[in-house]
Image (spheres, helix red, strand yellow):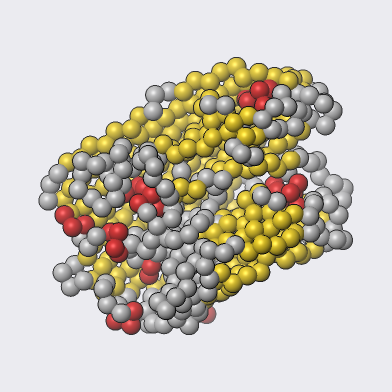
């Protein structure tokens, strides 16, 4: 088996979401018994992630896009703000409703309003009888974009022909919740949401906080979709990259390194050679491609000169000329309403040496050991109407992986961990405030193809984060996230669909707890039938 022939390669451009809506938890007595093997229909896609909480306030709904995607022609439309809910909202929620039937690969897409990418996601693969799914995302941070009429562009790149028959029928809406009375302090949503113009950024001269978000995904049907499995040119494997599998997403301002981050190892719904793993429960973030965030506030004094500044995003480790990464940029800006010009300076940029080593050991089971990492500290200050504020951003990245495969790739396995440890300290206007975010991404799995053409994939994926906020050295808030997917699926390869005799057991447990409360839900499927839906908080 050559992985490039078996793995589902995603065609098209790239789309997002935040919390994927499934059915409400039900008791075990309401769950069906699974069949002996997959049939022609299965449970609609769902995840264990929490739904978006709706405020107890007046709401208004606006349809943003409604389209059937058959090719790579984007939907073009116009957005108009809602009437009857004001222009300051306590929350704005995006919802995508979709349906598809027949046969289709996983597809990627985006939703832009006024050029701002507010949504990126992948799609589930359908059953012959058809599936429906829904996705919700809290998009309150884009409120500035929603206050004026804007052009809308949406695309889920798709191919429909005699073989791939699934037409993606989707509808996207925004629900606006009127501001609560008395109104809360306007600390959450940024004052402005900007996009790059010809690769440059011009900020308002009174910007006091600046955050860039980058929807970085490796995709498009080539080896960069499976970047974590690539090997150096010296090793015999179907996906090669000059320096192996280490990837790092960097952002630069006027050529100066301004931020580093580990990309999340997305696995789409045809990944790891086995769509039966994902028919009901997708991997973490498959329907919720969260952006990487970079706090660029240390650069605010430089950026606030009224001139355009070059902003570049690149992915370390991608072979020169290799396509497959998409990295659109939004810039969120908080302004000092009492100042026309917020001056300041960049005081420190200290980058450690980038470590990236891969050791190939040939054997009957080939092995590639990879270690990579990087560190960056950036500091700067701004002189605001409420005094001088210094911001320091420290970020430390690390990646270790062991990739094992046999000749012909009939057995192919990976065990990998990525850590992204970020500390942001804001000193000024009272005791220093520090937010530390420790992100850990994990992947452990093996795909094997037996002599009887039975293909089996066993896989565990983890998305974890620990956040602690302190003020004056005392903890003020904290949270822990653990989103873990496990799957075991087997089918007969290289035969028509009705002869695959597929079986699969998959589960997801999503735990989020901390000073704000607790959420804990687990869902389990067998042969596409929901067999467990349990909440523990």
251 w.r.t. 223: above or below = above
Q: Quadrant of residue 10?
A: bottom left
Determine the residue positioned at 73% across, 35% down.
Answer: 334
8 w.r.t. 479: above or below = below
Q: Is there any visible trace of residue 277 in the rendered image?
A: no
Determine the residue positioned at 50% across, 60% down.
Answer: 108
Is 209 displayed left or right of 253 in the figure? right
Q: Is there any visible trace of residue 351 in the rendered image?
A: yes
Determine the residue positioned at 67% across, 65% down.
Answer: 65
Instruction: State the image coordinates of residue 185 (x, y, percent, origin top left).
Output: 80, 41
Q: Quadrant of the N terminus?
A: bottom left
Q: Quadrant of the C terminus?
A: bottom right
Determine the residue positioned at 79% across, 41% down.
Answer: 186
Instruction: State the image coordinates of residue 423 (x, y, percent, origin top left).
Output: 55, 30
Is 331 displayed left or right of 280 in the figure? right
Instruction: State the image coordinates of residue 465 (x, y, percent, origin top left).
Output: 51, 44
54 w.r.t. 195: above or below = below
Q: How many marks?
A: 0
Instruction: State the image coordinates of residue 370 (x, y, percent, origin top left).
Output: 29, 38
**Going by the picture, which residue comes out furthest to the left?**
364
């Amino acid at each position: 088996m050559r992985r490039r022939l078996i793995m589902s390669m995603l065609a098209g451009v790239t789309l997002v979401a935040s919390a994927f809506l499934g059915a409400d938890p039900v008791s075990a007595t309401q769950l069906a018994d699974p069949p002996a093997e997959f049939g022609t229909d299965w449970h609609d896609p769902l995840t264990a992630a929490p739904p978006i909480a709706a405020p107890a306030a007046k709401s208004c709904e606006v349809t943003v896009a409604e389209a059937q995607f058959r090719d790579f022609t984007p939907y073009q439309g116009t957005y108009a703000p809602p009437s009857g809910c004001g222009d300051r909202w306590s929350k704005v929620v995006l919802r995508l409703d979709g349906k598809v039937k027949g046969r289709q690969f996983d597809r990627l897409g985006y939703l832009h309003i006024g050029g701002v990418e507010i949504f990126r996601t992948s799609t589930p693969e359908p059953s012959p009888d058809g599936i429906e799914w829904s996705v919700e995302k809290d998009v309150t941070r884009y409120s500035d974009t929603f206050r004026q009429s804007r052009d809308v562009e949406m695309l889920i790149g798709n191919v429909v022909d005699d073989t791939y028959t699934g037409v993606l029928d989707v509808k996207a809406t925004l629900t606006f919740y009127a501001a609560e009375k008395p109104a809360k302090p306007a600390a959450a949503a940024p004052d402005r949401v900007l996009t790059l113009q010809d690769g440059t950024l011009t900020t308002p001269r009174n910007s006091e906080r600046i955050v860039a978000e980058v929807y970085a995904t490796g995709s498009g049907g080539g080896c960069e979709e499976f970047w974590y499995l690539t090997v150096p040119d010296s090793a015999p494997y179907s996906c090669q990259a000059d320096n192996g599998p280490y990837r790092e997403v960097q952002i630069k301002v006027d050529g100066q390194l301004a931020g580093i981050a580990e990309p999340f190892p997305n696995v789409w719904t045809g990944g790891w050679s086995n769509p039966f793993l994902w028919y009901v429960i997708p991997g973490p973030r498959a329907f919720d491609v969260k952006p990487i965030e970079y706090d660029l506030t240390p650069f605010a004094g430089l950026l606030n000169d009224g001139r355009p500044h070059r902003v570049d995003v690149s992915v370390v480790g991608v072979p020169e000329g290799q396509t497959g990464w998409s990295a659109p940029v939004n810039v969120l800006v908080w302004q000092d309403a009492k100042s026309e010009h917020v001056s300041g300076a960049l005081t420190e940029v200290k980058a450690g040496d980038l470590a990236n080593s891969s050791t190939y050991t040939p054997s009957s089971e080939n092995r590639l050991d990879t270690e990579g990492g990087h560190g960056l500290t950036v500091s700067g200050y701004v002189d605001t109407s409420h005094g001088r504020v210094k911001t320091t951003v420290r970020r430390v990245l690390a990646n270790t992986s062991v990739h094992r495969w046999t000749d012909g790739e009939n057995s192919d396995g990976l065990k990998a961990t990525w850590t992204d440890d970020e500390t942001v300290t804001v000193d000024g206007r009272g005791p220093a405030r520090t937010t530390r975010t420790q992100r850990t991404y994990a992947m452990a799995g093996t795909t094997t193809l037996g002599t009887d053409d039975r293909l089996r994939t066993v896989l565990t994926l983890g998305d974890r984060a620990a956040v602690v906020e302190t003020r004056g050295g005392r903890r003020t808030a904290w949270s822990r996230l653990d989103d873990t997917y496990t799957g075991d699926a087997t089918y007969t390869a290289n035969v028509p669909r009705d002869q695959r005799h597929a079986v699969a057991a998959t589960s997801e447990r999503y735990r989020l707890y901390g000073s704000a409360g607790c959420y804990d839900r687990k869902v389990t499927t067998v042969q596409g039938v929901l067999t467990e839906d349990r909440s523990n908080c």
